[in-house]
Amino acid sequence: MTFAFDAYVTAALFDRAGRAVFALGDGTVRFTTGETIDAHPDGACLSACLPPTGEGVLTGGDDGRVVVSTPAGAQELARIPGRWIDVVAASAESKLLAFAAGRELHVRDAADPAFSRVFVHEKSIADVAFDPKGRRLAAATYGGIWLWYARIADQKPAILKWAGSHIAAAWSPDGKFLISAMQENQLHGWRVADEKNMRMGGYPSKVRSLAFMSKGNLLATSGANGAVCWPFAGATGPMGKQAAEIGYEESALVTRVAATPDKPWLAAGLDDGRVWAADVTGERLVHLKSEKGPPITALALSPDGRHVAWGDEDGGAGVAEVG
């Protein structure tokens, strides 16, 4: 099925009920079951993720609001007047949600409206990621990654330092590694236990999308002519190992990747509007959207690995079955 939303597609997600959900630049959240929720009536959806419950979608907007939307309607969870909420994250394990407003990292408890934590950074926060247990938060910023214990009010962060601007962060499913994408065309990684770091380069463009898959044994990324897959099996992760590239095409770049941690399926969206999925164990590649168009800006793989949802910068979107 395909859609024409006439607004930039900020995010595509599958919620716990298996519905595909799209967060749009016109401030609405669209469900494939037909509901349109006006999550940010005075602005745009800048960021989105699954809420701790897995039902519906959690969005941050340029109206300073954090909102959870389900087919029944929208509920405001937080408001920071005059600020843009361009980063949101949530943990099903700890029931916590986090969002960034400039240099501030805010943490809230979905089950306790009175709970609130604010952690201040030296520079603006570009991305936030919960560890697999939902207890620690990684904030990507200029100069490295700041690590916080999500529930502790007064603390000094552990700082994984590396010169440059860090724009995205991802924990490995076992919590042993933390990977960041940088403003330069490269990744940087750390083994969290001893802060041993690693440079992961060779990209022709900026990496904006990261996804662990195959029980955490592979990290797939955008930023190249195919989906770049780094090996993470073993205690040293990708240290001293080479990446593989899936679906290489000289005429296009991968803009988004999507996966689920326990499945071998990987989805990729390209800057020419095409979308494909691949089984990395059998090297099988399925073209889900073959016609070219605007660059893909949003991509999701359903938890069972059977469906892919995508959206582009002009508001085109779709959902297709894999194989």
Image: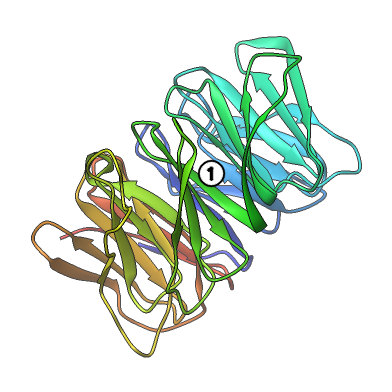
Image quarter hosting the C terminus: bottom left
The residue lying furthest to the left in this view is 282
The x, y position of residue 294, in whole percent, is 52, 79
**Residue at left offset 69%, top offset 48%:** 141
**Residue at left offset 46%, top offset 23%:** 92
Is residue 167 visible in the rendered image? The answer is: yes
**Residue at left offset 78%, top offset 38%:** 121
The x, y position of residue 146, in whole percent, is 65, 37
- Mark 1, other Cα within 10 Å: few <14 / some 14–19 / many ≥20: some
Is residue 24 visible in the rendered image? The answer is: no
The x, y position of residue 85, in whole percent, is 75, 44
- Look at the picture and state if 25 lies above or below 17: below
The x, y position of residue 103, in whole percent, is 80, 41
* Residue 273 found in image quarter: bottom left
Image quarter hosting the N terminus: bottom left
* Residue 154 found in image quarter: top right
- Look at the picture and state if 54 lies above or below 19: above
- What amino acid type should be assigned to the residue bearing mark 1? Glu
Position of 254 with respect to 45 (left or right) is left
| Disc 1 target residue | 35
- Look at the picture and state if 180 lies above or below 285: above
